[in-house]
Image (cartoon, helix red, strand yellow):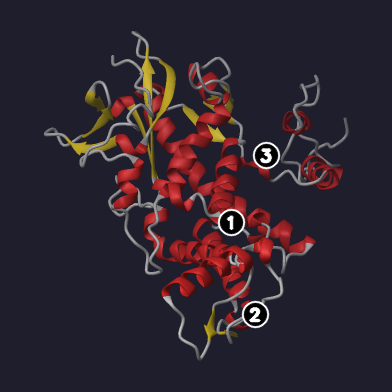
Amino acid sequence: MIDFLSPFTNRETSSLSSPSAWLSEIFAPTSKAGVKVTAESAMQHTSVYVCVNVLSESVASLPVSVYKRYEKGGKPHKEKAYAHNVHAILHDEPNEEMTAFSFKQVVMLHLLLRGKSFAQIIRNKAGQVVWVYPLSADNMEVVRLESGKLGYLYKHNKLGKVPLMASEVLHFIGMSLDGITGLSPIEYNRHTIGLSVAMEEFGSTYFKNGANGGGVLQTEKSLSNDAFDRLKSDWSAKYAGLVNANKPIILEEGLSWEKLAISNEDSQFLQSRKFSKAEIASIYRVPLHMINEMDKATFANIEHQSIQFVIDAIRPWVIRMEQELKRKLFTAAEKKNHDIKFNLGALLRGDTKSRYDAYESATTKACWMTRNEVRELEDLNPIDGLDDLLLPLNMAKEGSDAKE
């Protein structure tokens, strides 16, 4: 059994086969806007940062439980397997250095930025999982062994390339063309992100120059080299930058100023920025109100967009993680009657009145929930006598005696 491999120890070493972040950025693909886009540089853009943060924190905040399936009275049942070692790992503490929230967020961050995420599985001598540690996706290489099975090579700065078997690695992937290699959302959308970054840089430069566009200083006289250098340095010192914005311009030697640049409104700069934010949000299926774009938001559509966010954005990531966790953390025998589930209901609980109305309908009208099941959803202990379904008199079967 290989000891835990530190996930980020290879950051300071660099080679062409295993480049560090600064070297990768030099050779990073350039967008059509002329901006080089990497996972690290994209995170410096507010819209990308917010989308990635919202998604990773949403998934990380979801409770994870292990369920055991069994038959009772000839019908399938399931219950939480609190005593299972995997339940404690995923629900409370995946390793001795991280909380469950931190672990899930790290996994999601790599998925959202690189399209792939890895974690090392540590087992005891009995083969039981005792810890899982996240590994840097940049340092992992997926290989096909002679047996036809997948293997992994992890680049460690002290140990070199460390081989890992598939049973030792949790391998999460996003969208993929071959089912093995995840596609990086940043790389595949670098032109959209690059354009937005370029507009941010333009805006920063614009305000750095005192929110004044370009222009031309004109004179009919001929300036000497010394006069030209003095004019250039004085102009930068007196009129450039926000601190000098709106200062009156004093010209001499017959100089005149002619502004050339068009205004922000004329260039549709603000509208372009809004469109760019919407484009980035669409990459991650994040509603605009979640990245502070509230122009078309109302109380009604925000509620529906939030539900859609859980179904269309969160749920696919959760299913990917559930299936990989079940595939790698359970033994062959346990897979037959154990499941791992993220509780999406934690994001769909709504306000107090809506929840209580739904509970009332589920327990007294539709009659598909018991009152103890409702108490469990509200983090309350069960009470004796509340495990039976309520059956209204008008729902009794024909010919049956509905009286107690």
Whether residue 286 is visible, yes or no, is: yes
Residue 137's place in the image compared with 230, above or below, is above
Of pointers 3 and 1, the one earlier in the residue sequence: 1
> Residue 302 placed where, x, y %?
72, 59
Closer to the chain start, of discs 3 and 2, is 2
Dot 3: what SS?
A: helix
Q: What's the CA distance linking mark 1 and mark 2?
A: 27 Å
Q: Give the residue displayed 60% in from the left and 79% down from the top.
A: 268
Measure how far apart labels 3 and 1 are at the Cα level.
Answer: 18 Å
> Which quadrant: the N terminus?
top left
Q: Earlier in the sequence, mark 1 or mark 2?
A: 2
Q: What residue type is labelled 1?
A: Val
Q: Residue tagged by mark 3? A: 346
Furthest residue in direction bottom, as rendered: 220
Instruction: Give, as a three-letter code, the residue at label 3.
Output: Ala
Determine the secondary structure under disc 1: loop
Asked if marks 1 and 2 touch (Cβ < 8 Å), the reply is no
Rendered image: mark on residue 265: 2
Q: In this view, does 347 lie to the left or right of 230?
A: right
What residue is pinned by disc 1? 286
